[in-house]
Image (spheres, grey):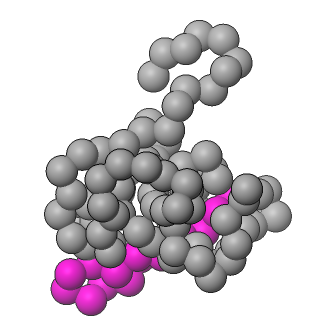
Amino acid sequence: MRPKVGEKVVLLGVPPGFVDDLPRSDQLAITAAIGTMVRLLDYDDDGRAEVEFIEADGSIHSIFVDPKYIVDPEDHPGQPHHEGGEPRTQIERPPPDDAGGGGR
């Protein structure tokens, strides 16, 4: 089931290359949010999910990702999920698309 706007979701990952051209501070903030709970702000006209997370220093970030990169915490078994900005021990990635290739 598609998460609803305003709910907390787990950010499973970001697409390859997503952070490559960003400033180092943004790269660190986004990668630190992977595996944590973030707030789902909205879906854009193309169906991408806008999520927001807050760093430990209070900086607020929002990014747009394909909905396959977010999941309701209730539907995501595994280690406990932390609020954005806290350290985590494992980076989780969504499963590869079924459209051939199968590589990452």
Position of 97 relative to 63 (above/below): above
Picture coordinates of residue 51, whole percent (x, y): 53, 70
Kindly identify the residue that appears in the image at 73 percent across and 56 percent down: 1
- Toward the viewer: 17 or 80? 80
- Extent of the magenta region: 48-61
Picture coordinates of residue 70, whole percent (x, y): 55, 55
- Residue 36 location, quadrant: bottom left
Instruction: Name the residue furthest right.
Output: 45
Kindly identify the residue that appears in the image at 40 percent across and 76 percent down: 53
Picture coordinates of residue 37, whole percent (x, y): 41, 68
Kindly identify the residue that appears in the image at 59 percent across and 10 percent down: 101
Picture coordinates of residue 13, whole percent (x, y): 43, 48
- Residue 41 location, quadrant: bottom right
- Residue 60 location, quadrant: bottom left
- Toward the viewer: 11 or 46? 11
Position of 12 relative to 39 (above/below): above
Position of 99 relative to 20 (above/below): above
Is residue 42 among what the camera can see?
yes
Quick check: 12 left or right of 75? left
Quick check: 28 left or right of 71? left
**Quick one: quadrant of the C terminus?**
top left
